[in-house]
Image (cartoon, grey):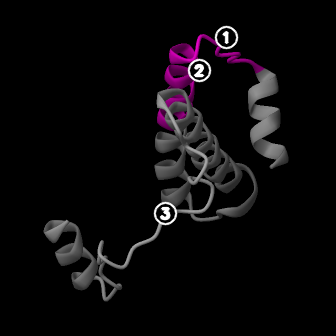
């Protein structure tokens, strides 16, 4: 945490104080390992959606688009891993990317 706070300070951002921190929204119903994996899957889906949307719709700078294009498949790989852990079919097909673009 000290290293993270040093980094945040270097970029003029607020530091994190765990004594005053509260759970993130949506985490109050996490009760077991399956819930944790479901939450992680949702976070990865949101991240993949962010990068996909940036590549397709929002970002005009080609250097940033390249960075997003390199990160987005990693987020999808995380989704596939979590779906596998949950015993679900990863469904890597056009429908996945259609879902990413519609959020």
Residue 1: percent from left, percent from top: 20, 65
How far is the residue under mark 1 from the one under mark 3? 30 Å
Which dot, 2 or 3, sits closer to the camera?
A: 3
**Whether residue 15 is situated above or below residue 4 in the rendered picture:** below
- Please, what secondary structure does the residue beneath circle 2 have? helix
Residue 31: percent from left, percent from top: 53, 39
For the point 56% across and 52% down, which residue is it? 27
How far is the residue under mark 1 from the one under mark 2? 7 Å
- Please, what secondary structure does the residue beneath circle 1 have? loop
Q: Kindly report the secondary structure that dominates the magenta region of the rendered protein.
A: helix
Magenta region: 73-93
How far is the residue under mark 2 from the one under mark 3? 24 Å
- Mark 3 highlights which residue? 23
Q: Nearer the viewer, residue 15 or 50?
A: 15
Tell me the tag on residue 65.
Answer: none
Residue 47: percent from left, percent from top: 58, 48
- Mark 2 highlights which residue? 83
- Mark 1 highlights which residue? 89
């Amino acid at each position: 945490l000290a290293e993270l706070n040093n980094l945040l300070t270097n970029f003029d951002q607020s530091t994190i104080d765990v004594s005053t921190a509260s759970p993130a929204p949506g985490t109050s119903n996490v009760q077991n390992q399956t819930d944790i994996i479901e939450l992680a899957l949702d976070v990865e889906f949101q991240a993949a959606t962010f990068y996909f949307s940036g590549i397709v719709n929002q970002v005009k700078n080609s250097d940033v688009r390249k960075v997003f294009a390199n990160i987005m498949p990693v987020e999808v790989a995380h989704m596939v891993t979590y779906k596998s852990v949950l015993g679900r079919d990863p469904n890597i097909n056009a429908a996945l990317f259609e879902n990413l673009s519609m959020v």
